[in-house]
Image: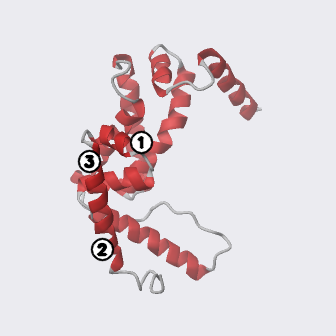
């Protein structure tokens, strides 16, 4: 019954504001007191913010805190939003990354404990352990990149955003994004190459 109610609520919102309301439209409706619009926008943007925060921080609890703070800032900013000034998602990515940077500067680097990973339950224990090692190695390698390279690589190759989108988020040119991404990939390859045998890539 709860799922049906939720579906009906979403259908009602969709019929009122269109089948595919934009982020900006939902933000404007929230600013006018529509709680359902906030719920829909949270469902849409929250996971994106969390994904970036988790990769930048390597800690699930901290990533959740950053995501909550980023979304809270979005709600506080909603009444002042100027339509057409930027994409809501671009604004949220930028705030999320800045919060991550601030948090990292306030603490010492920690060992990755909660790197995201997807395991095949049919895989052998050895394979699972190796997959975990590779996931941790990637996270550790990302954390060794210079800050701007790390951001560009995460947004391009993990979040799969386009170079123009990343340029808007990072407030740099598309050419600068391409340069940061290329250098970041080379650095990652160099860092991970030192652990090829350990990670089971000796035959790759």
Task: State the residue at coordinates (59%, 67%).
Answer: 119
Q: How far apart are marks 1 and 3 (CA)?
A: 29 Å
Query: Can you identify the residue that label 2 sits on?
Result: 190
Q: For the residue labelled by badge 2, is the local secondary structure a helix, a strand or a loop?
A: helix
Q: Residue 67 carries which label?
A: 1
Q: Who comes first in sequence, dot 3 or dot 2?
A: 3
Q: For the residue labelled by badge 1, is the local secondary structure a helix, a strand or a loop?
A: helix
Viewer-side residue, 154 vs 180: 180
State whether residue 111 appears in this view. no
- Give left or right: position of 131 versus 162: right
Which percent across, then down, holds residue 33? 49, 15
Q: Which mark is residue 140?
A: none
Query: Can you identify the residue that label 3 sits on?
Result: 175
Q: How far apart are marks 1 and 2 (CA)?
A: 31 Å
- Give left or right: position of 162 versus 184: right
The quarter of the rendered structure image containing the N terminus is top right
- The answer to which image quadrant residue 58 occupies is bottom left
- The answer to which image quadrant residue 141 occupies is bottom left
Outermost right residue: 1
């Amino acid at each position: 019954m709860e799922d049906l109610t939720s579906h009906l609520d979403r259908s009602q919102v969709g019929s009122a504001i269109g089948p595919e309301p934009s982020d900006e439209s939902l933000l404007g409706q929230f600013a006018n007191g529509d709680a359902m619009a906030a719920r829909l926008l949270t469902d849409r943007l929250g996971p994106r913010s969390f994904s970036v925060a988790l990769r930048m921080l390597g800690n699930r609890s901290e990533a959740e805190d950053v995501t909550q703070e980023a979304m809270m800032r979005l709600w506080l900013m909603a009444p002042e939003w100027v339509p057409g000034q930027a994409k809501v998602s671009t604004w949220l990515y930028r705030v999320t990354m800045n919060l991550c940077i601030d948090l990292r500067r306030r603490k010492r680097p920690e060992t990755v404990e909660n790197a995201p990973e997807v395991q095949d339950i049919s895989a052998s224990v050895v394979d699972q352990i190796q997959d975990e090692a590779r996931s941790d190695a990637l996270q550790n390698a990302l954390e060794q990149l210079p800050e701007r390279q790390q951001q560009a690589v995460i947004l391009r190759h993990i979040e799969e955003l386009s170079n123009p989108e990343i340029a808007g988020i990072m407030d740099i040119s598309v050419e600068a994004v391409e340069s940061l991404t290329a250098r970041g990939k080379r650095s990652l390859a160099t860092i991970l190459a030192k652990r090829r045998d350990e990670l089971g890539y000796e035959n790759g």
